[in-house]
Image: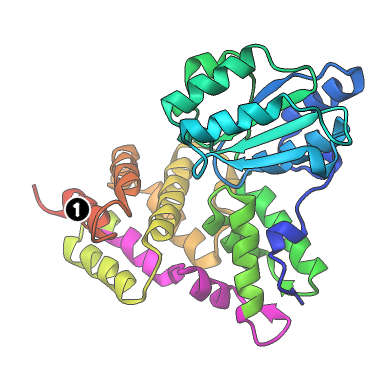
Amino acid sequence: MTDHVALYRKYRPEAFKDVRNQDHIVSVLEGAVNKGNIPHALLFTGSRGTGKTTVARIFAHAIGAKDVDIYEIDGASNRKIEHARELLEQVHTHPYESPYKVYIIDEVHMLTKEAFNALLKTLEEPPEYVVFILATTEQDKVLDTIISRCQVFQFRAPGRDVLRDTVLSVAKKEKFKLDAEAADLIATAADGSFRDALGVTQKVIMASDGDKASVDEVAHIVGAPKTALLLNLISALHEKDVEKGLQVVQDAVDAHVDMKLFVRLLLERVRAIILARHTKNDEVLSGYSEEEQKLFGEYAKDLKSPIHSHLLLRLLSASAETGKTYLSHLPLELAVVELCAPK
């Protein structure tokens, strides 16, 4: 059973061979290490929980930096010009025990313009023993002059299958039983983040009375809707029944369903119906329950069904706005009204 150590820390990759889903980055970094051609400024960019700081630490150790010569800095709390000046003063002292001093600056986009400009001077002519690894979830907020002096690596968000396999692997190591459907729900809730996937897994393990958890137990913990709610809303959209659709949304609110997750699961199912209608790929619906496959198959064959690309686009718009308003369900309610109410 899991202990007090966070699972994402306990199972954090410690070598390049353990890194998942980032082969395009690992191969380049390993090549640089093997050839001794070490870049002095790297920019790791990508969504949260994709392994940017983890790979930064692995790379630092791979080039021979000991922990005493690896400095991790949070750009959000060390964003001012005075922080940058302190850092740049330290840069010119030699490493204690290693061939390199490595500075890992996380969320580097949070630095002020003045701090960026101070950092730029060092990036232009860094001491030969210094390596900067900058990490960000928002590359567009990093100055172009900084980016141009870095080797840029784009981290990929892991797909649901990768996250599901990771969850199942960690659960097994923790001697906890999860079936594929429960692991898949955790992967969906994690939304492309290894860290979030293991965080949810730990919640499930902690909340369980025994050594296993059903998909319904996982759904309760992550705030996922029951399948019936999703099917009822899809039926309302198909029938253009605005009253039924609004009632389903309210039922989801009353059940304390995570609205972002609800909309994401709805989008997946609407997409599956559209793909089933326009492709010959039988695998499109294979991941759903027997009840869902039957209903989605019927809607896919109905060429007059209002479940089409325009409806999906409207739901995508609602998804982008979900969580940004005081009432998290308001964007979905508006979409239901627009899509179902008589013109």
Among all residues in the image, which is located at the extreme bottom? 209
Report the number of discs.
Answer: 1
The residue nearer to you, when weighing 118 against 103, is 118
Magenta highlight range: 207-236
Looking at the rendered structure, the secondary structure element under dot 1 is helix
Depicted 277 relative to depicted 42: above or below: below
The residue nearer to you, when weighing 293 against 180, is 180
Depicted 274 relative to depicted 200: above or below: above
Residue 264 x/y as whole percent: 43, 53
Query: What residue is drawn where x is 54% and y is 76%?
Result: 216
Query: What residue is drawn where x is 75% and y is 19%?
Result: 39
Q: Is residue 227 magenta?
A: yes
Residue 174 x/y as whole percent: 79, 71
Q: At label 1, which amino acid type do we have?
A: Leu
Left/right of residue 312 with respect to residue 61 in the rendered view? left
Depicted 273 relative to depicted 123: above or below: below
**Can the viewer see residue 140 in this picture?**
no
Color theme of the render = rainbow
The residue tagged 1 is: 334
Q: Badge 1 local density, few (<14 within 10 Å), some, or many (20+)?
A: some
Left/right of residue 292 with respect to residue 72 in the rendered view? left
Query: What residue is drawn where x is 25% and y is 54%?
Result: 325
Query: What residue is drawn where x is 45% and y is 69%?
Result: 223
Quadrant of the image containing the N terminus: bottom right
